Image: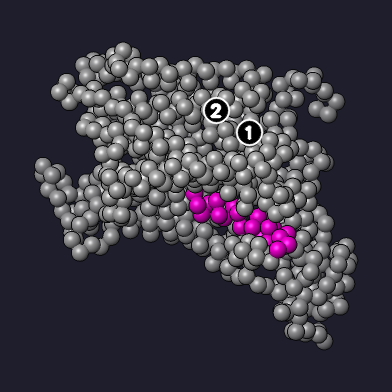
């Protein structure tokens, strides 16, 4: 039966080029693993597809933020200028909506932008100052010139020896266990 | 195509001038850019430059302190010139910021790879320029500690700001612009802060950069969402940047003052903003690449492209001047016609001619390939355009207000020493912030440079 090694986070292998990384990710996925991640110092083209990542929620959150900013902004101005603090200036209409458009526009952009940034951070569960992958000594290179694949022990198929063999097969260097803490 | 060899120095070869020097790898770009922050000793030149800029900033602090003690009477403002330097400098600084957003957002959407090595410090420039701009309306209120009145907050007096006023639109436009520029810049910085965290040797630096990077680990799942967010921010910043100077121009165009009340103001202000902004990017880029040996990253191709953008936006501005002139005469409105005469022959005519010289005539030299590739000429040209754009705002504000409808309302304006101290002081503050920025943060986006290395190595295959 499969051996569960829950006292480690996973197994990690290192790669020198984005092409090797893509190849490795494809192979690991083909072998049936699902709980694994790739690490790269820049967004590698095709990596999301290789990992099978679908569309994410950031655009939807951004849309909601923009709608909230725009609709909220417009009706706030309407409420302030036409309802709670009406000023009769030469009998002009209180709901002078064209004059509310610039502020509505700016608040739409503000709402959407803040939603995009904070939505992205929240979905990525950042800030998260520590993470088991940082226990790997060579992982400091993940932010400069090296690429990594980590198969997590939470994967149903996880088996330490089997994963290490698979990583070796795709020419990973420095295959190491990742300690939990 | 492969057996076709274009002659040396043909336009084809020029077009192929690389956006990054040859032979760079992921490691070498990382080393070079991060070493400026982490290992390179602070040079004597940095200390001298910083000291000069910081002294000027000190002068600004004194000028503002005296202003708060004595009130706005220490400035040259009067009736009819109620704003004077405060609005001239505000518009000038906000305009300068626009190039940063143009480079980081619009050129990103247009997939212009050459933007990569200049976008980080151009965005920083935007932030610092907006900070300088924000000072002027704030201190012009006379009681800056009451400036929060401009924001809608539930007060016990039951008052709300007048949302139909362009000045309130300005508050929202500029504060949104500052906020969005800040988050856009910070999102771009996150992967680079992680690089600095991983490469820092000293413990305190590791902790500071570690906290700022928020534990970024380069996970593919994170990059996936990061790229969505970055693209969306670029898409949002694009209409935003066009709206900001449009709203600034409304401060003028909504009023019925001759020379202000025209529909050409919004597009012509936006073009002028980008024009002056690119001039400022050049003013910063040229010494920066020299001081930190970044000629491999900020290549002649970048300088050439920026000069071309300057030339193009300068021509749009020239078109704006021409139509402002033409429509005033064509309208037959005697106040507008009189204003044109005052620009050409009035007491401030020398400013108008200097403006035409700086903004329209001199930049035509940039048509020449040789001059565009002469770094010294570009540097001087960028300063000339900055001066020209400042003169433009001076001419718009002062000539119109001193010569409006009835002669009894005419006036004269001349700035006092405190006006100059505040203005030059904000330049000191801007330069101080830039000096600190290049010392503690990567002035070029490292992650995007790696992407560029990956792209260019693919092209060669």
Q: Secondary structure at mark 2?
A: helix
Query: Range of the magenta residues?
Result: B181-202
In the image, residue B193 lies in the stretch drawn in magenta? yes
Q: Secondary structure at mark 1?
A: helix
For the residue pair B65 and A18, the one nearer the viewer reads as B65
**Residue that extends furthest to the bottom in the rendered view of this protein:** A1
- State the image quarter where residue B78 is shown: top left
Indicate which disc residue B286 carries: 1
In-image side of A2 versus B407 (left or right): right
Indicate which disc residue B224 carries: none
Give x and y (percent) for residue B28. Answer: 78, 48
Is most of the magenta stretch helix, strand or loop? helix
For the residue pair B44 and A40, the one nearer the viewer reads as B44
10 Å crowding of disc 2: few (<14), some (14-19), many (20+): many
Looking at the rendered structure, the number of numbered marks drawn on it comes to 2
Residue drawn at 77 percent across, 75 percent down: A178
Residue A43's place in the image compared with A167, above or below, is above
In the image, residue A72 lies in the stretch drawn in magenta? no
Residue B349's place in the image compared with B453, above or below, is above
Give x and y (percent) for residue B31. Answer: 76, 51
Give x and y (percent) for residue A167. Answer: 84, 68
Quick check: marks 2 and 1 in contact, CB under 8 Å? yes
Residue B129 shows up from this direction:
no
Q: Chain of mark 1?
A: B
What residue is shown with label 2? Answer: B382
In-image side of B272 versus A125 (left or right): left
Residue drawn at 65 percent across, 40 percent down: B45
- State the image quarter where residue A42 is shown: bottom right
Residue B175's place in the image compared with A15, above or below, is above
């Amino acid at each position: 039966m499969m051996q569960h090694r829950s006292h480690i986070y996973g197994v990690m292998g290192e790669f020198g080029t984005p092409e090797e990384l893509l190849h490795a990710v494809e192979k690991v996925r083909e072998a049936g693993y699902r709980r694994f991640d790739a690490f790269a110092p820049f967004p590698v083209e095709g990596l999301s597809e290789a990992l099978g990542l679908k569309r994410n929620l950031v655009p939807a959150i951004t849309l909601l933020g923009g709608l909230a900013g725009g609709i909220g902004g417009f009706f706030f101005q309407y409420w302030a200028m036409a309802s709670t603090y009406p000023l009769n200036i030469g009998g002009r209409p209180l709901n002078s909506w064209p004059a509310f458009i610039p502020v509505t526009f700016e608040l739409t952009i503000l709402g959407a932008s803040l939603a995009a940034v904070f939505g992205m951070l929240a979905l990525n569960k950042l800030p998260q100052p520590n993470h088991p992958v940082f226990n790997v000594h060579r992982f400091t290179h993940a932010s400069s010139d090296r690429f990594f694949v980590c198969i997590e022990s939470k994967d149903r198929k996880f088996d330490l020896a089997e994963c290490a063999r698979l990583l070796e097969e795709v020419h990973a260097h420095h295959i190491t266990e990742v300690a939990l803490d | 195509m492969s057996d076709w060899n274009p002659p040396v120095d043909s336009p084809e070869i020029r077009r192929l001038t690389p956006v990054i020097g040859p032979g760079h790898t992921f490691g070498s770009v990382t080393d070079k850019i991060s070493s400026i922050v982490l290992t390179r000793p602070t040079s004597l030149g940095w200390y001298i430059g910083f000291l000069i800029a910081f002294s000027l900033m000190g002068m600004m602090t004194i000028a503002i302190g005296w202003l708060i003690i004595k009130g706005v009477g220490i400035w040259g403002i009067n009736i009819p010139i109620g704003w004077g330097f405060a609005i001239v400098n505000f518009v000038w600084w906000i305009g300068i910021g626009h190039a940063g957003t143009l480079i980081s957002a619009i050129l990103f959407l247009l997939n212009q790879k050459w933007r990569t090595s200049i976008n980080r410090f151009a965005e920083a420039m935007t932030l610092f320029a907006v900070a300088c701009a924000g000072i002027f309306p704030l201190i012009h209120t006379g009681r800056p500690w009451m400036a929060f009145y401009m924001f809608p907050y539930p007060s016990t007096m039951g008052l709300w700001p007048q949302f139909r006023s362009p000045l309130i639109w300005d508050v929202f436009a500029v504060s949104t612009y500052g906020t969005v520029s800040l988050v856009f810049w910070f999102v771009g910085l996150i992967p680079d802060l992680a690089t600095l965290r991983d490469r820092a040797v000293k413990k305190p630096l590791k902790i500071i950069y570690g906290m700022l990077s928020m534990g970024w680990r380069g996970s593919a799942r994170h990059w996936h969402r990061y790229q969505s967010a970055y693209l969306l921010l670029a898409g949002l910043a694009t209409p935003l940047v066009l709206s900001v100077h449009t709203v600034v121009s409304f401060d003028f165009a909504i009023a019925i003052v001759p020379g202000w009340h025209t529909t050409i103001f919004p597009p012509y202000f936006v073009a002028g903003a980008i024009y002056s902004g690119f001039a400022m990017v050049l003013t910063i880029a040229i010494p920066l690449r020299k001081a930190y040996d970044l000629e491999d990253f900020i290549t002649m191709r970048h300088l050439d492209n920026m000069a071309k953008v300057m030339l193009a936006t300068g021509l749009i501005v020239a078109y704006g001047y021409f139509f402002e002139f033409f429509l005033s005469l064509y309208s037959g409105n005697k106040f507008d016609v009189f204003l044109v005469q005052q620009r050409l022959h009035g007491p401030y005519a020398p400013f108008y001619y200097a403006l035409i010289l700086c903004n329209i005539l001199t930049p035509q030299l940039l048509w020449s390939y040789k001059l565009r590739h002469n770094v010294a000429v570009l540097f001087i040209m960028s300063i000339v355009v900055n001066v020209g754009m400042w003169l433009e705002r001076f001419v718009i504000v002062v000539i119109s207000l001193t010569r409006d409808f009835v002669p009894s309302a005419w006036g004269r304006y001349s700035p006092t020493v405190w006006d100059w101290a505040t203005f030059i002081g904000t330049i000191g503050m801007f330069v101080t912030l830039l000096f600190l920025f290049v010392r503690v943060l990567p002035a070029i986006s490292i992650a995007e440079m790696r992407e560029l290395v990956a792209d260019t190595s693919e092209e060669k295959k």
